Image (cartoon, rainbow, N blue to C red):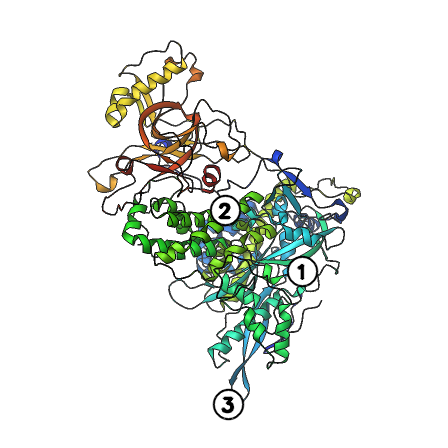
Amino acid sequence: DAPPPPAAPIDPPHNPPPQQNPGYHAATVEDVEDDPDGSQDPEDEFVERFPLEYRAGSPLRSCPSIYESHRQRLQAEDKEMWSPFDSEGHWELAKWLVTSGVSQNKINSFLKLPAVQDMKFPFSSAQSLYKTIDTLPKGPEWKTSDIRVHGDRLTDDGVPEVETVELYFRNILECIQDIIGDPALKDDLKYAPCRVWSDETKTERFYSEMWTGDWWWETQMRLPERSTIVPVIFATDKTNLSLFSGDKVAWPVYMTIGNLNKSTRRKVSRRAWRLVGYLPVAKLECFATQEGRRVGGWELYHECMRQICGPLYSLGPESGGVEMACSDNKSRRIYPFVAVFTVDHPERCLIACCKDNYCPECEVDPKKREDPTPSKPRSRSSIELLDVFIQNPLSDTAELDRLGIRSIKNPFWRNLPVFHVYKAFPPDLLHQLHKGIFHSHLVSWICDILGDEEVDARFKCIPKHSTLRHFAKGISTISQWTGREAKEMEKVMVSVLGGEKTELVVCARALLDFIYYSSFTQHSTETLELMQSSLAVFHDNKDVFVELGVREHFNFPKFHALIHFVDHIKRWGSLDGYNTETAEHLHIEFAKVPYRRSNRKDHLRQQTLIMNRQEALHFWSNFIRWALNNWRDVEEDDDMDDTDDVCPEAGSDEAEFESTDTTIAIVDEANATVVQPHHLSISAKTLAKLYDDGARFLPAVQEYLNRKYEDPLLLQASDLFDVWNQVHATLPALIRGQKLRITEPIRAKPAVSSHIARANKPEHFDNVLVNLPSNCAMLMNSKSILKGYRVARVRFFFKLDYHFFSKESEQKMLVFVRWFSRFPRSAAQNVNMYRIKLTDEYSVIPLSNIRQTVHVVPDFKGARIADKKWTPENVFRLCDTFFLNDYISREAFKTLS
C-alpha cells in the first residue's frame, strides 16, 4: 500500500522528498564485555536451518563491492589510490585535522606555519581542506521537509495560527543499503533465520540473536523464494545538547538492521547504526492550551515518522522487494520490514497511541497492573475504534477509554507491512530493570527498611574485587545515578540483606535473579522457566514490603512489564540486543559532538554536514585499508552457476572456543610473560615478619614437597624465595563450552604504611576457587559445580629455587593460601548462597589449580553494624562466617548459583 496522506492539522511538505618495571605496576584489567552465557559448546548444539526449498537469504547474482566500484572509478580516471590526496602522509594529516575538533581558525593558523608549508601540503586553508573532504564518497544525503502545523490559537484576522517546523531526514532505503553493503560488516551479517536446539531431539531451544527468534522464522514463511528479510530496528530519544545552560534539545532517530549480530550493533565504533532523522522539537505556540500542544506534538511525531518510513510502505510481502548489493559481493532481493523500537516507556506509549498509565502491549486495567496474570494482548484492530471516533466524535468512547487509546488521527504504522506495533517493544534492561525496578524501587525500599546509615555501613565493608566498584562512602551520598552504579550495587545487594526477615531476603533475591536472567546473552527453555519462577517467587512474597510500610501497592508500569519479558525473548532473541544504553552512546557521536563543533546557530544544518564528513572519513579509512592489499585487479572465483544452491550464511560460522587445557600464564600489564618479583630472594624468616601468618609458610611448603617427592629436601628458615604480590592469569572456564575469561589480576598485597597519609595503602588479598587434586576434570553441570572445589584466600605467590626440583623445567609458580571451610551440602536457604568460614588451615598449591577469582562477603546475620566500623580489610578478622557471592558476575551467577 502507498503511504496514506497526512491528516489535518498537519499539512504535507511543500517539496516531497525523493528517495617503570611492569612487575611493580598496579593491576590493570582490560574492559571487555561479560559474555559468560553467550555460547554453548558447538558440539552440543543442533542448528535447524530454514527449509531449503525457500532458499531464504540466497543471492541473485554477483556484484562488485563499494570498494571495488570506487577502485574502478579511480583507475578509469587514471588516478592513484590516495586521490584526491597526494600521499598517505597528506591523508593522515587531513584526517587528523578534521577529526580532532580543531577549529577552522586554528587549522588556518597551522597551515600557515613554515614547517607545514615546507611539507607542501596541498591545502592552504581549512576551506579548501573541507572542500576536498566533501568530494569523498559519503553516506546518504540529508533532506529537509517543512511541515506546517495548524493550531487552535487565532490570529488578529480570526485565522488559526500556523507554525512551520523543519524535519531533517535521509532516505531509509539508502541507509539500509549503506549498512548491508558495508564490506567492513561482511562477517557480522546473517541473511536467513534459524532455530537453535540443544540436540536433534529439539527438546530445549536456545534464543540469542534476532534470527533465532520466532518473528523472523514466521515472517520468512510469508515471503516468496530467494527472499531476504532485513528487520529495521529504530531507536529514538530526546537528548540535551547544551551542557550547563541553554535549552538546546535534539530528537535523533537512529536505525540499524537485525541482520547484524547484536555484539556489533552494541559497538558504536563499528558504525552499525545510521542517523536517519532529526525530529523537530517545537514549542507549538500556535496552540492556546497545554493540552492542545500535547495532542499537536503527538500528531507531529507520527507525521515525521511517516515521512522517514515513507519508502517502506510499498514493500510488503507481495511487492517483490527491492534488490540490494550486499557486503559479500552478492545482490539479494530485500524485504525491509520495521520490526523493533528500542525506546523508553513514554515513547512506547507515544508510538502505540496509548496513555502513559496504560500498558502498550496488553489490555490490562491500569488499576490491576500488579496482577501476575497476563491480560489479553492488544490487537491492531483497535485502530478501527479510533477511526470510528474520528469520523464521528459524538460516538461512544467507552471502549477507547477502556483501552486508553489516544486520539491520534493517522498513526504512522497504520499501513506499514508486517509491523505489529503492540509487539514491537522489547524490554529495556537499562531503564526498566537497572535504573527502574532495582534502583528507583528496590534500593529505595531497602534503605527505608534498614536505614541509610546501616545500608551505607554494609556497603562500605563489602570486600573488594577486581570487577566490583567499592562504595567507600556508601550509596546515600551518590548524587547522580547511572546504569553503571545500579549494576555494581546489584552484585552485592543480596549480601547486604543477609540475615534480615526471610520474606524480605527471598523477595529481593528473586527480583535480582530475574534481573540477572534477563541479562543473559543466550537463553534456553530452562533459563526462561527460571525467569518465570523467579518472578512468581517475588509475587508470592512481595507483600512483605507492604507489611514493613515501605510500599502501598505495586501498580506501576515498570513492574507490570516484567510479565512480558519471556514472550519478547522468544520473539526477538535475548534482550541485550535491544538495550537503550546503545542509544545513549549514539547521542554522543551523532548529536552532542557535532553540536559542540558547530557555532550553535542553525546547528542542525551544521550537524548534518559534520556527520557527512565523519562518514566520508570513515569510508575512506576503510577503503584505504582494503586498497593497500587490493589495488590491483584480482581474478574473481565466484561462479554464479552455484546460486541455485543455498548460499552459506555470512557470520554463521560456529563459535571458536579456547581449549580447556590452557595453561595459566604470568603476565604483566604489557602482556609480557616475564615479570620481576616484588621481593627477590627473600628468606622465609623475613617473610614471617612481613606477613602476620608468615610463620605458617615454611611448614606449608615442606608439606607440599613431601607430597610431591619421595625424598624431598628439608627447608631452612634461611632458604630464599622469589615472591610476587600480584599476577595476571588467564583462567579456564568451569564449564566446558564457555569461553575463557581474559587475563585478570589476582592480588595479594599487604598493607603499606607511610608518614604521608595519602601514601598509606590498605591490604588486599583476593579469594580464589581452587580445584582440589582429587577432582581435576572439568565440571559439566550445576549439580556438581562445587564438588572437588574449595575457596582459599591468597597470601602471596612464590617460586622455589630450581635445586628443589629434579628438573629445572618442573619449576612452577606456587601460591601460599589460607583455606575457607569446605562447602556445605546445600546453600543457605534465604540468600541461596553457600555459607563458609575462614579456617586456620594453610597450604601451598600450584597456581594452575586456581579456576577463578571469587567474591566472599560477610554474613551480617541481621545484626546492625553501623557503629562497628567494619572495613573491607578488617572484616575477615571481625566476622566469623561468610557467603560465596554468586552475583559478582553473570558468569558466577550461572555457574555457582
Quadrant in the rendering for residue 748: top left
Q: Quadrant of the C terminus?
A: top left
Which mark sits nearer the N-terminus, 1 or 2? 1
Amino acid bearing label 3: Asp
Badge 2, how many Cα within 10 Å: few under 14, some, many 20+?
many
Q: Is residue 120 left or right of residue 695?
A: right
Residue 247, placed above or below residue 857 = below
Q: Which residue is mark 3?
A: 156
Q: Farthest residue to the top: give it.
A: 711
Percent x, y for residue 180? 64, 51
Numbered badge on residue 517: 2
Does any portion of residue 480 appear in the rendered image? no
User: Closer to the camera, 811 or 654?
Assistant: 654
Quadrant in the rendering for residue 388: bottom right
Percent x, y for residue 521? 53, 45
Number of the front mark, 2 or 3: 2
SS for callout 3 = loop
Which mark sits nearer the N-terminus, 3 or 1? 3
Numbered badge on residue 418: 1
Amino acid bearing label 2: Tyr
C-alpha separation, residue under disc 3 versus residue under disc 1: 47 Å
Residue 331, placed above or below residue 46 = below
